Amino acid sequence: MALKDAVTGKQQEAPARRAATAPPPLSSGDRLTRREFERRYEATAYVRKAELIEGVVYMPTPVHYGGHSEPHAHIIGWLVAYCAATPDVRLGDNATVRLDIENEVQPDALLRLEPAAGGRSRVSEDDYIEGPPELIVEIAGTSATIDLRDKLRVYQRNGVQEYIVWQVYDRRVDWFHLIEGEYTPLTPDEPGVVRSKVFPGLRLALPSLLDGDLARVLAVLQQGLASAEHADFTARLAEQPEAKT
């Protein structure tokens, strides 16, 4: 039964009816379509992060400082430095990414190119990323099994060109590159530096990263940013019509 507001005199929906039309709360383990996942996610205000992976809802545990927060910050700092020297490469931190009908993820970090520069993702009208970014990074503390199995298959199938998984507790970083539809690990050089195949000049000193030597990580990156390959890359990006606006 409709109720009348004592002040405005307008008809108000009964509380029981409002409760009946509200979506169910989002719960870890739910099997949902992406559309239903988004409906419940938007209605569940207390949930800060949830992902839909192969149609299943995953909700992370509280974030540990050494196991996730600090490594995450180091990765973001590394990528920020690259973006600062590489106009028109876009960075995201925990951005929602719609990949397909059963997969909507929030990777810890990503780099993407605009479509005019050859990128395969776009920003939707409701301000989410749709399609595969060129690079995704996941900090795998307690989530290593998901990141190296289910998410790896999803990113591989949807065409994410490069995928980095930092297994914090195992002191290991895997950097995968997509070749003919399958991920192949990139091999570090003798000093332990890995170089991106998609973003020229993006270099990561693995031993320094694992030791928490952020100064050395950024110094090696600066060497990449001073390279001829990075200069050529930024020149190509500057030639794109949309990149100049």
Image (cartoon, grey):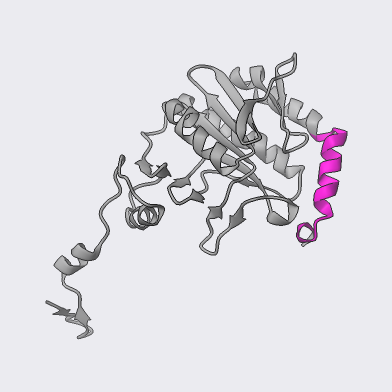
On-image quarter of the C terminus: bottom right
Residue drawn at point x = 14 percent, y = 78 percent: 3
Q: Is residue 3 above or below residue 50?
A: below
- Relative to 242, is 178 on the left or the right? left
Identify the image quadrant of residue 134.
top right
Instruction: Give how far across and how far down residue 161 sits, in percent.
Output: 64, 38
Looking at the image, which residue sits at the far bottom?
Answer: 9
**Is 227 part of what is drawn in magenta?**
yes
Identify the image quadrant of residue 109.
top right
Q: Which residues are magenta?
A: 225-243
Residue 169 or 98: which is nearer the viewer?
Answer: 98
- Relative to 231, is 220 on the left or the right? left
Residue drawn at point x = 65 percent, y = 20 percent: 206
Q: Is residue 12 above or below residue 24?
A: below
Total numbered circles: 0
**Is 17 part of what is drawn in magenta?**
no
Q: Main secondary structure of the magenta part?
A: helix
Instruction: Give how far across and how far down residue 151 sits, in percent.
Output: 48, 35
Asked if residue 108 shows in the view, the reply is no
Instruction: Give how far across and how far down residue 223 sits, in percent.
Output: 80, 28
Asked if residue 54 shows in the view, the reply is yes
Residue 109 or 214: which is nearer the viewer?
Answer: 109
Identify the image quadrant of residue 176.
top right
Looking at the image, which residue sits at the far top?
Answer: 190
Instruction: Give how far across and how far down residue 68 sits, in percent.
Output: 48, 29
Residue drawn at point x = 55 percent, y = 26 percent: 166
